[in-house]
Image: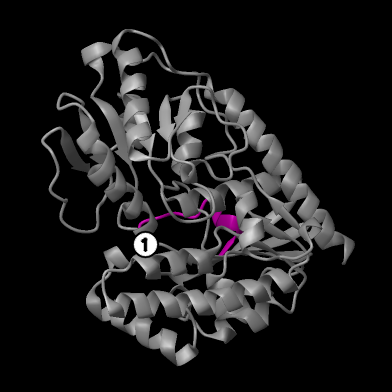
Amino acid sequence: MHFVFVSSLVPVAAPASGYDIANRVIADAIRMLGHQVSVIGYLQPGQEPAQPGRTKLLGELEVTNARVGSWQKAMWLKDAFVHGEPVSVAKMHAVSPGDVRAALSALKPFDGLILNSVQLPGAFHDIFSAYPHVFVAHNAEAKTAAANAASAGNALARMLYGRDARLLALLEQRFCAGARHVFTLSDADRSDLEIGDLRRATALPLVTSVTPPKAPEEQPQGDDAACDAGLIGSWGWAANRAGLDWFLQRVVPLLPDDFSIAVAGTLGDAPPEVSRNVRFLGRVPDARAFVRSCHVVPLVSRTGTGVQLKSIETFELGLPAVATDNALRGISVIPENCMRADDPEGFAAALRTQVERARSGADLRLDGRTFHARQLDGLKAGLETGISDLLSHA
């Protein structure tokens, strides 16, 4: 069968963000089931499509707020009010409805659409909803926007996030009602989206690539580790930054002065003032090499929906971790070298335990290929269920 994957950003050859990784993996897993998958959407500048011959680009588009100027942000906000849409959806109007229809027609014949998140499908709902489709909800986006509104630091931000939350809720309801099957990335999102008949919804386990990870590498011993605890992420996103701030403000003060911490990834603003045992590295050339060089990986998510790809990656690499409950959402089987803690005192104590074991020479690493194989099997089975619903109505 031939399906068209409709996504704001197309799957790319070198995915880096969690959204890019999920896009690539879902499209690749559908191909593993024996189906043909074409793609329609925008390409983020500097990227290359994963399947150029199967990709119909609407053009290049930078959608990350931190990478554009104030003028572009103002234009997006204007478009959001003009179209009565959430800001993330309004960004998609860089092309006309006619352009979208032409791109979609160029991919015919096809058996159905896979509407990937709300952004591009929401901007051109009338076009895409005319075809048989399933819906992939990467997050419960209305819930995430409402949480951002509640934690916003000023009245304007609270108003804008609150507006997005209301409009996203309407879009999610529309897509969940109109789709022949709904895919989420966690069981919690199936409940938050109020799908109703849960036989029409499947939570998909994720992997970071359909290709299995390599065998585990040797654990750094004692002073060979680059740091005791290493965190990496896109900290400019509100939900990610909330977790980092909680860790720096509530957990780090409970750790010994000689407990070394490195934070990799872009912050989006100036680094906060922290104790001297914390270093901010910015972008690192090799994310996996960085986390492998640390004794333990803190997984610090406190808010947000969907699944944490950094948690998935950590477990695929077999790395020892300490994780909050929110960092483990969407993961049914937790590796034995991951300790759970949801309060600052428990989190700090678990970090000390993990690092003391590593410093003493214990090898805490596991073979992440076992975790990966279980996740990939679940992903393919879940996709097969939803695709069967799509085809059974054809």
Q: Which residue is mark 1?
A: 45
Q: Which residues are magenta?
A: 45-56
Seen at 49% across and 42% down, the residue is 325
Asked whether the viewer can see residue 357, the reply is: yes
The extreme bottom residue here reads 82
- For this rendering, which residue is in front, 212 or 281? 281
- Is 313 part of what is drawn in magenta? no
**How many marks can you see?**
1
Q: Is residue 130 left or right of residue 223?
A: right
Residue 380 screen position, x and y as percent? 71, 42
Asked whether the viewer can see residue 284, the reply is: no
Q: Is residue 384 left or right of residue 51?
A: right
Seen at 40% across and 74% down, the residue is 161
Q: Is residue 275 above or below residue 185?
A: above
Seen at 43% across and 84% down, the residue is 80
- Is 51 part of what is drawn in magenta? yes
Q: Residues within 10 Å of mark 1 (few under 14, many from 20)?
A: few
Q: Is residue 234 above or below residue 334?
A: below
> The residue tagged with tag 1: helix, strand or loop?
loop
Residue 334 screen position, x and y as percent? 56, 31
Task: Indicate the quadrant containing the C terminus: top left, top right, bottom left or bottom right.
Answer: bottom right
- For this rendering, which residue is in front, 124 or 254? 254
Q: Is residue 277 above or below residue 182?
A: above
Task: Indicate the quadrant containing the N terminus: top left, top right, bottom left or bottom right.
Answer: bottom right
Q: Quadrant of residue 264?
A: top left
- For this rendering, which residue is in front, 116 or 182? 182
Q: Is residue 116 left or right of residue 89?
A: right
Residue 145 screen position, x and y as percent? 45, 68
Residue 27 screen position, x and y as percent? 62, 51
Tag 1: amino acid: Pro
